[in-house]
């Protein structure tokens, strides 16, 4: 059965004309939203854990590279900046991982 676009438009117009006007109720949305079930969250915890594991491995690799190439006879500003950056990144990764573990359902 082949339909004509004009028929669809005419049908939509007729339906709109015959529909009763909905009453205005400011509480309608809130009442409906309160009765809806909670949203189903996909279980992507494994992906977050894998991302934290990769970040931790990268931090450990950075520490290994930094300590291997560190020359204690001459300490440069670059060494201090690298040390501070690695320390901050490692703390943030560990903090976020622990926060996610402790607050997850």
Image: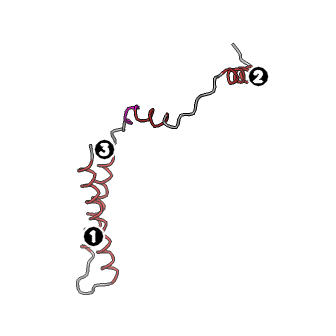
Q: Are marks 3 and 1 in contact (CB under 8 Å)?
A: no
Main SS class of the magenta portion in the image: loop
Residue located beneath label 2 in the image:
6
- Residue 70: percent from left, percent from top: 26, 78
Q: Nearer the viewer, residue 33 or 2?
A: 33
Q: Residue furthest right?
A: 6
Residue located beneath label 3 in the image:
45
Position of the N terminus, as image quadrant, is top right
Q: Which residues are magenta?
A: 35-39
**Residue 77, relative to residue 18: is it above or below?**
below
- Residue 67: percent from left, percent from top: 24, 73
First in sequence: mark 2 vs mark 3:
2
**What SS does tag 3 mark?**
helix
What residue appears at the point 26 percent right and 65 percent down from the top-left corner?
Answer: 91
- Is residue 97 highlighted in magenta? no
**What SS does tag 1 mark?**
helix
What residue appears at the point 32 percent right and 48 percent down from the top-left corner?
Answer: 48
**Residue 9, relative to residue 63: is it above or below?**
above
**How many dots with numbers?**
3
The numbered disc on residue 87 is 1
- Is residue 36 highlighted in magenta? yes
């Amino acid at each position: 059965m082949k339909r004509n676009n004009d028929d669809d438009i005419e049908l939509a117009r007729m339906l709109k004309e015959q529909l009763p006007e909905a009453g205005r109720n400011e509480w309608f949305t809130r009442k409906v939203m309160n009765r809806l079930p909670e949203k189903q969250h996909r279980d992507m915890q494994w992906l977050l854990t894998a991302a934290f594991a990769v970040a931790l491995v990268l931090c450990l690799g950075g520490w290994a590279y930094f300590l291997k190439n560190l020359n204690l006879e001459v300490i440069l500003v670059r060494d201090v900046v690298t040390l501070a950056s690695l320390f901050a990144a490692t703390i943030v990764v560990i903090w976020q991982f622990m926060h996610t573990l402790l607050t997850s359902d």
